[in-house]
Image (spheres, rainbow, N blue to C red):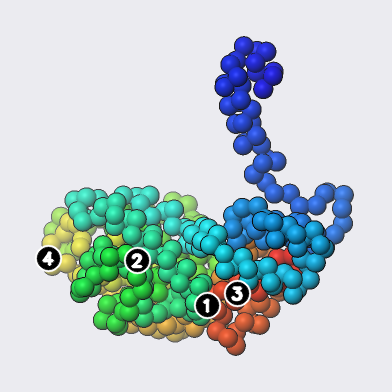
């Protein structure tokens, strides 16, 4: 500050420059643990307290957590478990319940491509906010009630307000605020994959994108990032002139005959085509609105075949297959650990992740249990 003032800046301007320098410094936004010359397998108690607090509360440790670290007892499993339970019951856990699903499910992409008002005139800011709120509240319910992880994929309920209830075409009376609402099989809903937020963030504002949806399921739900497409792949051609209206699915099936594309598309496409009954803003449909071409809007086809040979006829059947997938808990834990430890998981981490998944299998992989067991594991406490 003094140097800035000596250069002729006012105190306010000098203070602003100094503050900006602090905020952009790597020492400010990187949380370093230990020192390069120190050979330790685990973080110390104060580092563990910091890691735990920033994971669950997105903030520094409070006095009880500092006290536990200062006593040298925090690394003990019973002391750590007591602190975890206390912190999970604190109101500040809301920060985790909002921040983690936003990163995991890529909710920042909702509204990134604003729907075309000519095609979707009903889309408005309230609907967009409600979409994100539904998914955030849904994850919070999974956590607070320690519901099985499979209910993230397939369930008979969701969190609705009146705007979303109308958007989903559900009969009244409609809830005023976000409320847990039971869903019948006739709604086609249940589980986060049928939330309007997820269905819209995997679309482009004008039409749904089955390949994008499939890639999202592969990456977010199964923790497998598909390889990038090969260069110079021809785009899907629009329907023009007097040609019959054609679904995106039909175009993809023709497109995927290319030997350069078929190996990846056979794995990705079924994961996205399972949601053909939902348009670009997450509304249920039985026909696809196709611009151009002649004839009636074609019927959608949400059936598919997974690479392992299992088949499904509609979104409900696909969700049941996915909810029972053995990879689900490990994939969720990988996403959770990436958020908690602020790094990408490696092959060396997989044994610990699979061990947690196996240990929590008998109780159904409760969401809160998975979070708790990750913290109590060596993976969370290692450098």
- The residue under label 2 is 178
Mark 4 or mark 3: name the one nearer the start of the chain: 4
Where is mark 4, residue-wise? 295
Rendering quarter of residue 362: bottom right
Residue at 62% x, 11% y is: 8
- Tell me what residue is drawn at x 63 percent, y 78 percent: 357
Q: Secondary structure at mark 3?
A: helix
Residue 104 visible in the shown view: no
Dot 4, how many residues are within 10 Å of its Cα: few (below 14), some (14-19), or many (20+)? few
> To which residue does mark 1 refer?
146
Disc 4 to disc 3, how far (Cα)?
A: 51 Å
Q: SS at mark 2?
A: loop
**Mark 3 lies on residue:** 370
- Tell me which numbered mark, 4 or 2, is placed earlier along the sequence: 2
**Is the residue under label 1 in contact with that under label 2 (CB below 8 Å)?**
no
On the rendered image, what quadrant is the C terminus found in?
Answer: bottom right
- Sort mark 2 into few (<14), some (14-19) or many (20+) by Cα contacts within 10 Å: some
* Element under disc 1: loop
| Secondary element at tag 4 | loop
Foreground tag (2 vs 3): 2
Q: Position of residue 239 (x, y in %)?
A: 22, 57
Give the quadrant of residue 190: bottom left
Disc nearest the viewer among 3 and 1: 1
Closer mark to the observer between disc 4 and disc 2: 2
**Quick one: which residue is furthest to the bottom in this view?**
362
Where residue 26 appears, as percent x and y from the top left, is: 67, 40
Earlier sequence position, callout 3 versus callout 1: 1
Q: Residues under labels 3 and 1: Cα distance?
A: 9 Å
Can residue 74 be seen by looking at this rendering? Answer: yes
């Amino acid at each position: 500050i003094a140097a800035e003032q000596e250069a002729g800046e006012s105190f306010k301007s000098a203070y602003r420059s100094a503050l900006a320098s602090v905020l952009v410094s790597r020492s400010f936004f990187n949380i370093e643990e230990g020192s390069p010359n120190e050979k330790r397998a685990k973080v110390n108690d104060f580092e563990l307290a910091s890691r735990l607090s920033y994971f669950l509360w997105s903030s520094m440790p409070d006095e009880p957590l500092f006290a536990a670290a200062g006593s040298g007892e925090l690394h003990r499993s019973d002391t750590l478990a007591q602190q975890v339970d206390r912190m999970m019951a604190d109101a500040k856990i809301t920060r985790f319940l909002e921040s983690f699903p936003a990163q995991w499910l890529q909710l920042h992409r909702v509204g990134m491509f604003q729907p075309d008002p000519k095609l979707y005139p009903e889309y408005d800011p309230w609907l967009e906010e409600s979409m994100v709120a539904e998914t955030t509240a849904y994850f919070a319910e999974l956590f607070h009630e320690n519901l099985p992880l499979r209910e993230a994929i397939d369930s008979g309920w969701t969190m609705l307000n009146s705007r979303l209830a109308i958007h989903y075409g559900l009969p009244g009376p409609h809830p005023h605020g976000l409320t847990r609402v039971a869903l019948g099989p006739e709604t086609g809903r249940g589980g986060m994959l049928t939330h309007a937020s997820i269905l819209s963030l995997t679309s482009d504002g004008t039409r749904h994108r089955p390949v994008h949806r499939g890639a999202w399921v592969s990456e977010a739900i199964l923790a497998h990032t598909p390889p990038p497409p090969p260069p110079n792949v021809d785009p899907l051609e629009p329907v023009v002139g007097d040609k019959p209206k054609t679904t995106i699915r039909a175009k993809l099936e023709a497109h995927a005959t290319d030997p350069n594309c078929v190996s990846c598309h056979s794995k990705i496409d079924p994961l996205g085509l399972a949601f053909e009954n939902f348009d670009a803003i997450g509304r249920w449909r039985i026909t696809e609105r196709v611009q151009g071409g002649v004839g009636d809007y074609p019927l959608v086809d949400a059936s598919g075949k997974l690479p392992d040979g299992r088949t499904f006829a509609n979104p409900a059947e696909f969700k049941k297959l996915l909810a029972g997938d053995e990879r689900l808990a490990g994939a969720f834990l990988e996403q959770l650990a990436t958020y908690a430890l602020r790094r990408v998981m490696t092959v060396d981490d997989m044994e610990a992740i699979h061990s947690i998944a196996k240990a929590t299998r008998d109780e159904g992989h409760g969401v809160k249990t998975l979070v708790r067991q990750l913290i109590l594991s060596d993976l969370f406490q290692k450098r």
